[in-house]
Amino acid sequence: MKFPIYMDYHATTPVDPRVLEAMMPFFTEKFGNAASRNHPFGWEAEEAVEAARKQVADLIGANPKEIIFTSGATESNNLAIKGAAEMYREKGNHVITCVTEHKAVVDTCKKLEKLGLRVTYLPVQKDGRISLDDLRAAITDKTILITIMTANNEIGVLQPIAEIGAIAKEKGILFHTDAVQAVGKVPFDVTALKVDLASISGHKIYGPKGVGALYVRRRNPRVLLAEQISGGGHERGMRSGTLNVTGVVGLGKAAELCRLEMAKDTERLRTLRDRLSEALHGSLDEIYINGSMEHRLPHNLNISFAYVEGESLLMGINDVAVSSGSACTSASLEPSYVLKALGAGDDLAHSSIRFGLGRWSTDEEVDYVVDKLTKVVRRLREMSPLYEMVKEGVDLSKMQWVSH
Amino acid sequence: MAYSNKVVDHYENPRNVGSLPKDDANVGTGLVGAPECGDVMKLQVKVNPETGVIDDAKFKTFGCGSAIASSSLATEWLKGKTVDQALAIKNTDIVAELSLPPVKIHCSVLAEDAIKAAIADYKKKQDELKGAKPAAQHAQPSA
């Protein structure tokens, strides 16, 4: 086993060696600018970019012409939301999103509010999913865009995307989804899901960092976006800037591998994730899974270990890379807003760990993590005044705490 | 975030973890913080009523590594100090000793609060013992 063990595949993934191999020539001998139309260097680069466009399109059931390359999913989200809001401003001024979206969506929506648009942030239910009734109720004749993520980055919960797509279609509203955590991991088809815009990231699917894509529907309806980066008119005028050819080639190859290996990977990871969950439940009491298990990415597990604070837990398993919703692991001193939105209580948000399994996770690693975590949780509970109080029969929710 | 060696040491080998009998008149208990804030400290002192010296100190903490280290260090410092000396411990002393970064200063503040709360609890118990009990009963506010 190699240490430290990596179980944070939602944060990023290593580049698959096959992806790197595909990219290598484009750093050196095939260095052309894909926009150079009048010599072989440019043609070669352009050909590679178009092949990658097709690879990405094939993964999500799109036409290659509907793929816009960007610097990453944060840019894709910005382009989709700001670009649509600006383009369709005359049609309406209302956007619907949800409270558990990634910051790249939430903060982009906040920016729109500053510019005078109205944004509805739908709550989520206890299982982490939005209610379709809430969505229907939020729609007005001024609604121009619905943006709801496919899979959440912390709890891995899958939103009812096909149902949202159907409602958006019925009402004639554009539907964007931040599909970063889902694409390449679970089946995602833009036609079946009736998605108009979808954000994709390279480094979440074993491709390189610094490259992403935005799917922009060309038919029924033809979606137009106001460009957010102006310049030479690359990418159908929606995103100027010389293409990151090596990155694009890597993203394409990564997408192809995901398409070919998804079924096998998904099955393996689901088994591994269930092994992790069952073993933890077998060895520890009072642990709680955050979010729906039924509608969830196969490689995600997010668990709260009651009476133990997340950062102290991470400190005890410092040879394992995972992340926590605890405030102490972030600069903001606020616990995860995603977990808070589930309504489980801030104390459980502080006690959470997110496990993200991936292409190179093994049974051996899972067993090691379970063993180590069990020891650390038991040790920290012995040290926890909350655990002691509960064992003495104190109801923590009825205590008068002195907040600070 | 990298932890200082001293924080790691207190986290891995916490001093004086445990509980003292909270109904003992010579034991003062401080419980500060809140679960929803991500840290709760319980700090207890056992004082020799003859000398006013803290004979024993114990803690239990729900919190990050720096919170655990701050309370562990506090119990170490408390032992052998008089009650008045204990009240002179400042959170900045803990920050300096553990090299806490700015985002962890609240952990040291909580430890100082815990010390003050434990000693206040001890003093209250002692006052009640010294015959203040009947007086307190007669001194019921009328309004």
Image: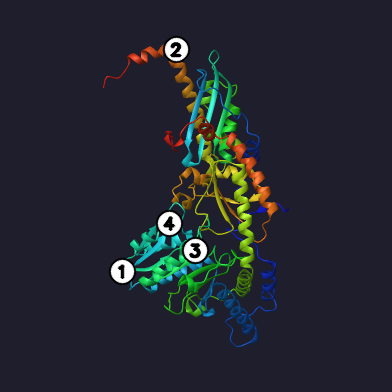
In the rendered structure, which disc, 1 or 4, sits on the residue that comes first in sequence? 4
Q: Considering the image in quadrants, where does the C terminus of chain A appear? A: top left
Residue bearing the label numbered 1: A141
Q: Furthest residue to the bottom?
A: A38
Measured from the top left, where is residue A11 in percent x and y?
Answer: 58, 58
Callout 2 secondary element: helix
According to the picture, the residue beneath numbered tag 4 turns out to be A99
Q: Is residue B12 above or below residue A66?
A: above
Considering only order in the chain, which callout, 3 or 1, is on the residue closer to the N terminus?
Answer: 1
Camera sees residue A232: no
Element type where label 4 sits in the image? loop
Question: Do the residues under discs 3 and 4 have CB atoms within 8 angstroms?
Answer: no
Chain hosting mark 3: A
Q: Is residue A400 above or below residue A46?
A: above
Chain for mark 2? B
- Say which residue appears at 60% left-offset and 65% top-offset: A205
- Residue B62 vertical position relative to residue A181 in the rendered view, above or below: above
Q: Are discs 2 and 3 located on one and the same chain?
A: no
| Residue A241 image offset from top left, x and y in percent | 53, 75
Residue A199 visible within the image: yes
Q: Marks 2/4: CA distance?
A: 57 Å
Q: Say which amino acid is labelled 2.
A: Lys
Which mark's residue is nearer the viewer, 3 or 4? 3
- Residue lying at the far left in this picture: please name it: B143
The residue lying at 68 percent from left, 48 percent from top is A368
The residue where tag 2 is placed is: B130
Q: Which residue is mark 3?
A: A150
* Foreground pick, A348 / B44: A348
